[in-house]
Image: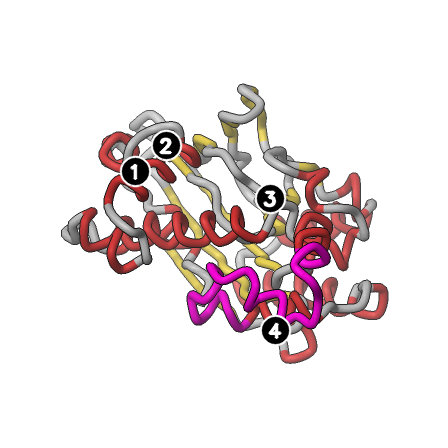
Amino acid sequence: MVLHHYRPLPELRFFISRIMLVHYQLDTSKPRPVNPFPPQPDHCLYFYPYDKMSSFNYATRLTGVAPRSMLIGPQLSRVDLTMGYNQLTIMVSFQPGGMHRLLNIPMKEMTDQPFDAALFLGNDIDSISQRLGETADYDLMIDIIQSYLLGKVSMLKSILPVEQVLMQNIQNGDLNNIDRLAKQSCVSTRQLERQFLERIGMPPKFFARLVRFSKAWYMRESNEDISWLSIAHSCGYADQMHMIRDFKAFSGVTPTGLQSYLEKSPLRLQRDSGFPA
């Protein structure tokens, strides 16, 4: 496995939070493993330059083959991913509200379903995907993507204070006090709700739950020896039962149930993608 995390160019950091490249080359004599991937708080642009990947979406109950480039907005449900044998994935993670500022559509309209990026970004994104598939140079791939994104900066919607506040508060783990979040964003609580639905795709309290859940699952994939009780305390759950309820809500199974799926796969997708930091 090859794994690289890239910090975006300075001109992109108000818009793009991080870029990750991971290249899995699996044993062709074995069946392709199915990998559970619980929802994350990130909105992302994905590229798959080599083998294609298929997925089963628990929200839509549909199985599909991913296009070469794909936009993933608010994800509230688990998906099961089946990788190709030569699976190269590049993930471009947007800052809070960044995908909305790029596409200029309400994020709640993109909940729980992937979209072919070409539907929103046009043929240019297809040519980017083609160029990525024609090289084996990882750094060049990232240069191609960042050059493309630089060309979009002048067309972005204006950033709002709430998005700037979220960038800081996600890092600090300070998302649970909605009144304080509204005050920091210079808006009323009702305005905060509207801005979240438009730019994040969900209410602020629900977003805070999703961030906390994602952190818990990332901790499990990063350290399989840590107890679930320790994870619950580290992530700010009142008790282990609160964490179990969130796991059922976001993945359909208990933490130990999801762990059993994970043990059937050699891959650690949440750990490799990296929790926002």
Magenta span: 168-192
Question: What's under tag 3, amino acid-wise?
Answer: Pro
Of badges 4 and 2, nearer the viewer stands 4
- Is residue 191 inside the magenta stretch? yes
Residue appearing at x 52%, y 46% in the figure: 206
Q: Position of residue 129 (x, y in %)?
A: 68, 48
Look at mark 1 in the image and give the residue it sits on.
Answer: 244
Look at mark 4 in the image and give the residue it sits on.
Answer: 184
Q: Are marks 1 and 4 in contact (CB under 8 Å)?
A: no
The residues tagged by marks 3 and 1 sit, at their Cα atoms, a distance apart of 21 Å
Q: Are marks 1 and 2 in contact (CB under 8 Å)?
A: yes
Q: Are marks 3 and 2 in contact (CB under 8 Å)?
A: no
Look at mark 2 in the image and give the residue it sits on.
Answer: 248
Kind of element beneath mark 1: helix
Q: Earlier in the sequence, mark 1 or mark 4?
A: 4
Of badges 3 and 2, nearer the viewer stands 2
Look at the image and tell me whether residue 68 can be seen: yes
Q: Is the C terminus in the top left, top right, bottom left or bottom right quadrant?
A: bottom left
Displayed quadrant of residue 181: bottom right
Kind of element beneath mark 3: loop
Query: In the image shown, does 38 or 6 lie closer to the viewer?
Result: 38
Query: Callout 2 environment at 10 Å: few (<14), some (14 to 19), or many (20+)?
Result: some
Of badges 3 and 1, nearer the viewer stands 1
